[in-house]
Amino acid sequence: MMRAQAVVFTGIGEVVVQQVDAPEPGPGDVVVDVRFSWISSGTEGSVLRGERIGGDEPWLPGDPPIFPRVPGYQKTGVVTAVGSDVDDIAVGEWVFSAVSRVEGMMGDMGGHISPAVTPRRCIWKLPPEVTPLETSGLVLTQVGYNCGIRAPINVGDKVLVIGDGLVGQWAAQTAAWRGARVLMAGHHSERMALFDAPGSVTVDTRSEDLLAMVEAHAPEGLHVAIDTVGTVPTLEALLPRMVRYGHVVSAGFCGTEGAIDIQKLRLGEKSVHAPSGWTTKRMDETLELIALKKLSTAPLISHQMSVEQAAEAWDLIRNHRDQVMGVVLTWAR
């Protein structure tokens, strides 16, 4: 058994940093000394509120307790040991690590933990063109990338992205990279100012009418509507303003309120995509696009805080959301 430092959710709204148990590394594991871990405020925040078990699975009355739990799923650091079956990763290399092993918690994997005993399949070498900081949110960047590649897009197609948070930013960046004219809808002007692509516009839904802006931006109809915040009523209201064979991409967590009227989709033969999780192929592609400067991550980091300040970081996320974008925890060397 190994001892590790970790961020732990001990109950609803309760965040502590404490020592936890991690298993001894197996032959297929890589041990990482973590330097940066990027908070996923959407997924982790939902878990902290007791809304979901993890991933995209909502917690329902009668389900097992979800606390205590090591949250998160993304970090970068330096390799300190490799198992006997690992022959393509060397000690001293910088890597990205997704979930890592933990014991004594509700759930046997977690993100914000160091040293991180990580299965080789959850490790990516960092190419020289990228920095450990800008790739420390690679899984979440991949979520946005997944939203942006899910539907077919031709150059000049009109794409609406609902949400100006991290996933919305990367979905919009991906759609624009593919040639779309993007309309980003949000209610944080300082966040929307971070997105800039030729032919694209933003709409502040606090003061502007979304449907009117859609009519102005895409009078012929939207080709794709990407929802990153979980707003089914808005998606249904947009359906009549979409072209025939248009595509809806729903990535926001809807909990138990995700029902959509399939008959409304039938009018105009719309398709629905429900991206979730990560795949090795998408992670590879996302990392390559960061290296090629097609996906931008570092400008979206609004705060870097030490891991000892994890509770303070979560307080900041909960109570000062307008001023918060990407929050990265730094770990002592």
Image (cartoon, helix red, strand yellow):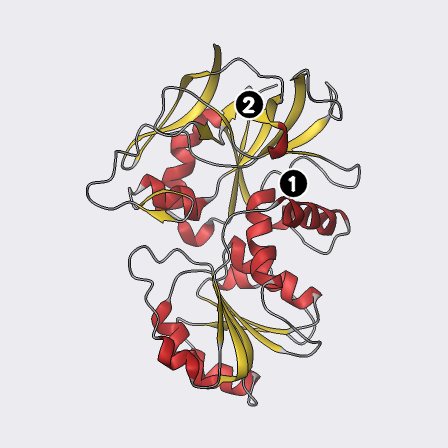
Q: Label 1 near label 2: C-beta < 8 Å?
A: no
Instruction: Give the quadrant of residue 235.
Output: bottom left
Q: Residue at x 37, y 75 (%)?
A: 262
Q: Residues within 10 Å of mark 2 (few under 14, many from 20)?
A: many
Which SS class for mark 2? strand
The residue at which mark 1 appears reads as 135
Residue at far right of view: 128
Q: Mark 1 is on which residue type? A: Thr
Q: Position of residue 232 (x, y in %)?
A: 36, 68
> Which mark is in front, 2 or 1?
2
Point out the image quarter for the C terminus. top right
Is 302 left or right of 134, judged from the image as shown? left
> Could you say where residue 332 lies in the image, as x and y percent from the top left?
57, 20
Q: Is residue 182 left or right of residue 210?
A: right
Q: Amino acid at mark 2?
A: Ala
Percent from the top left, x then y, of residue 1?
Answer: 47, 10
Q: Which residue is depicted at the point 46% across and 30% down? A: 110
Reading the image, the residue beneath label 2 is: 116
Closer to us: 305 or 133: 133
